[in-house]
Amino acid sequence: MKVFLNPGHCPGVDCGAVNNDYGVTEAAIVREVGDMVADYLRKAGCEVKLLQSDNLAGESPNYPNVCASANNWPADVFVSLHCNAAASEQANGTECFVFSHWSASDSLAACIQSQIVNSLGTLDRGVKEGPRLIVLHNTTMPAVLVELAFISNDVDCQKLIDRKKDFAAAIARGVTDYIQERGE
Ligand SMILES: [Zn+2]
């Protein structure tokens, strides 16, 4: 099983969402979590590639192309990692996006979503359709974009800082649950 991990954004170029009170950026958090997910999945017997790049599908040619790398490998599963943010500091929880419901992507997302909310105790915001998200639109394998938690919410942000290992283990278990479900 070949798993492609895409921590969102690009440190030094696009830091993603930030929480200035805590001095943390989305790009750095998801990179750390992504590296740990890669370790867990390799130990579970998966082949893993990880790419964090500002070039999702050809729009920034100076950087490696995320979707093309996953498609050309070709990956069996694609997981993009992000932190959510909202103007309201109250907004919190975990959600996953897929190109469309009733798909292999939807099953993969359900596995990851339930592992995270059960392990981290974050609010379950569910699996949603995001057909316009570039990494879901331009990849050819089951693909999920995970919004781990809200960097803009104090309780969620503290979890993103203190419990990266738990997020990573939950995401890795979600992927292996999906693999087992598919009988592969
Ligand atoms: Zn993001």
Image: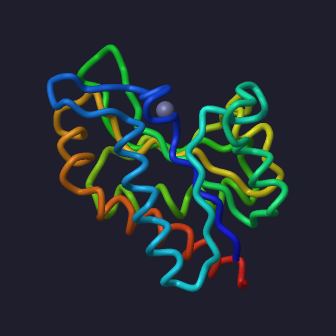
List the single residue furthest toward the front. 62
Residue 24 image-quadrant placement: top left
Left or right relative to 51: residue 74: right
Colour scheme shown: rainbow
The quadrant of the image that shows the C terminus is: bottom right
Left or right relative to 162: residue 44: right
The residue lying at 51 percent from left, 35 percent from top is 10
- As drawn, 12 above or below 65: above
The quadrant of the image that shows the N terminus is: bottom right
Q: How many marks?
A: 0
Relative image position of residue 143 (x, y in whole percent)? 69, 52
The residue lying at 75 percent from left, 54 percent from top is 70
Left or right relative to 160: residue 62: right
Relative image position of residue 50 (x, y in whole percent)? 58, 57
- As drawn, 116 above or below 152: below
- As drawn, 84 above or below 87: below
Relative image position of residue 129 (x, y in whole percent)? 66, 37
Relative image position of residue 28 (x, y in whole percent)? 36, 41
Left or right relative to 39: residue 4: right
The residue lying at 56 percent from left, 76 percent from top is 176
The residue lying at 29 percent from left, 48 percent from top is 122
